[in-house]
Amino acid sequence: MTDQERQEMVVTPWEVSGDIDYGKLIEQFGVQHMTQSIADRIAKHAGYMHMQLRRGVYISHRDTDWWLDEYEKGNRVGLYTGRGPSGHVHLGHLLPWFFCKYLQDAFDADLYFQMTDDEKFLHREDLTLEEAIRLTYDNSLDVIACGLDPEKTHIISDSDHIQHIYKLGLKVAKRITFSTVKAVFGLTNSDNIGAIWHPALQAMVCFLQSDREGRNIPCLIPAAIDQDPYWRITRDIAEKLGYYKPAQIHAKFLPGLAEGGKMSASQPETAIFTTDPPKVAAEKVMSAFTGGRDTVEEQRRLGGRPSICNIYAYYYFLFEEDDEALRERESACKSGSLLCGECKKQLAERVKDFLVDFQAKREKAKEVLDNFLIKPVE
Ligand code: TYM
């Protein structure tokens, strides 16, 4: 593919599009490449290597090695991640949340989970505040369905739980200038002033556990790399406020079902939502883009192209735990013996089974939702 044929890459907290070049992003964002040693150290504490670590889903980080050092010295460590509730949760969002569950168990860590209903209200013309807040509680069911520990998980709605976050948010806001926010987030004079304030609230959660517990606790943020601009400004001010800089571990994007890009809620036919009826999700899989050839004859002769195939990506990221089975699928595809129709059908079955199970967990989560919401410090 020539440079002209490639679509320009855009990666911001509000837009991810084009052909994503992770090498370039790592350079542009000034983050570190993920290392085998970090993966091994995490796996050692967890007792096993998570599929996302084995498969290189986490491509870069900042100071994750330091966060591990602190844990290995016997210090408590914490986790922070979040969601901007503007619609249903899709499978891409679940990737970092599944990983948080793994890390929470491995490191006995509290997880602060922020629902930025304010951010979504401020950035989306079509979203009312009431709907964004309703979605906070709806999306929380997905978070809970990932199996997190109610004793150690603190879900925060920026709007409904402002009393828990406003004071620290103010201290953070005082340290960030208007020109920094404009430069980092590309805001202009015609953006509303809420959008200028919101980054302070997303930043402050990095220090929230330390603030609540009255001592510094190293914080690690598992998320896709699109959220990185927030952590850049947070790291710049952390020490001035007397806190550690937050560490990050960055995931790649789960692609959508159409060619290229990431799974995006704004193209519902190309995303699988956790609330999709399993049959509808299976139909989406059956009409997905693949790395197949134009005709069966060509495919038998030349083989398929798993490297550009989104169906293969779904097996790789989520739906094939067994490394050997994944390798066999890849070579059957490349040799032309496994055709796209069959491969899609098998994935559709797995997606259906996954959704039946996840939706049952989501239903159960309604009974325990209150236990997961942030409480006042005792
Ligand atoms: P939001 O709702 O855009 O995304 C929620 C989380 O999902 C990740 N993500 C993906 N991961 C893999 N593949 C994809 N296709 C994909 N699409 C989204 C995002 O990186 C994110 O981790 N402003 C934030 C909410 C937030 C937050 C945080 C996120 C507040 N505090 C701390 C991460 C960490 C937002 O709108 O996320």
Image (cartoon, helix red, strand yellow):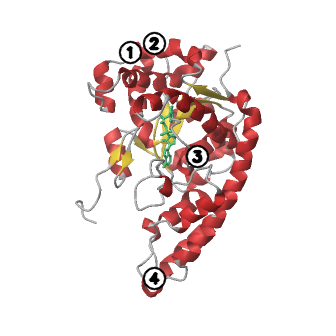
Whether residue 205 can be seen here: yes
Q: Which residue is tagged 4?
A: 299
Of the two numbered discs 1 and 4 in the rendering, the one whose residue sits closer to the viewer: 4
Q: Nearer the viewer, residue 9 or 29?
A: 9
Residue drawn at the location 58% of the way across and 26% of the way down:
157
- Above or below — where is 107 with respect to 378? below
Q: Which of marks 4 and 2 is nearer the N terminus?
A: 2
* Mark 1 in CB contact with mark 2 (< 8 angstroms): yes
Circle 1: is it few (<14), some (14-19), or many (20+) Cα within 10 Å?
Answer: some
The answer to whether 21 appears left or right of 337 in the picture is left
Q: Which residue is tagged 3?
A: 94
Q: Earlier in the sequence, mark 3 or mark 4?
A: 3
Q: Earlier in the sequence, mark 3 or mark 1?
A: 3
Amino acid type at circle 1 is Arg
Q: Which residue is tagged 1?
A: 175
Q: Which residue is tagged 2?
A: 171
- Above or below — where is 323 with respect to 215? below
